Image: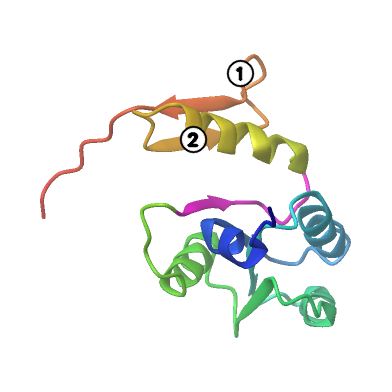
Amino acid sequence: MSIDLDNLRNEYIAIVPIFNEEKKAKKVLNSLLSSYPMLRIYVIDDGSTDKTTEIIKEFKDKNIIKLFNNKNYGKGYSMRLALSEITPDKNRIIFFWDGDDELDVKNIHKLIYHYKNEPNCNILFGSRFLVKNPILRIEEIKLPRI
């Protein structure tokens, strides 16, 4: 039985907003690629003024989609930009990964495991500041109608 990596790439998506991280950009992207070859990665350079843009442009991997802001609009704007490029799909797992390489990529599998194995789970948060349990689970989110 073979694994269809292209199908998996549509299921698991990492969004990596990044700004002025020339010392860490290459490492974080290589870590994601080597640890999770099934990932599709959207990296958004948020108008960096150092060499981050050039470093991102050097990546030739087809699993990295590169987006560039012409100036610094902020992390939230960059995350929304990437989301606007992704076709909605209820079976898709999308997560945000900081470009500062402060998180261990090996923790991604914990997020995926919890999400897939807890039927009432709609959203998960991971944080390096949650020491005892780095995963915060929210079972139900009620949003106001607009």
Task: Give the residues drawn in magenta, as a range.
Answer: 92-102
Query: Residue 68 sits in which quadrant?
Result: bottom right
Query: Residue 48 sits in which quadrant?
Result: bottom right
Residue 141 is situated, as x and y percent measured from the top left of the image, at 27, 35
- Residue 140 falls inside the magenta stretch: no
The CA span between labels 1 and 2 is 18 Å
Mark 2: few, some, or many residues within 10 Å (few <14, many ≥20)? few
Determine whether the residue tagged by mark 1 lies in a helix, strand or loop: loop
Asked if residue 66 is positioned above or below residue 129 in the image, the reply reads below
Secondary structure, magenta segment, majority class: loop
Asked whether residue 69 is in view, the answer is: yes
**Mark 1 = which residue?**
133
Mark 1: few, some, or many residues within 10 Å (few <14, many ≥20)? few
Using residue 33 as the reference point, say whether residue 129 is left or right of it.
left
Asked if residue 67 is positioned above or below residue 14 in the image, the reply reads below
Question: The residue under label 1 is which amino acid type?
Answer: Asn
Using residue 115 as the reference point, say whether residue 87 is left or right of it.
left
User: Which badge, 1 or 2, comes first in the chain's sequence?
Assistant: 2
> In front here: 80 or 38?
38
Query: Residue 118 sits in which quadrant?
Result: top left
Residue 35 is situated, as x and y percent measured from the top left of the image, at 80, 49
> In front here: 30 or 19?
30
Residue placed at 56% from the left, 63% from the top? Answer: 7
**Mark 2 = which residue?**
116
Using residue 119 as the reference point, say whether residue 25 is left or right of it.
right
Q: Please say which color scheme the image uses.
A: rainbow
Residue placed at 38% from the left, 31% from the top? Answer: 121
Question: The residue under label 2 is which amino acid type?
Answer: Lys
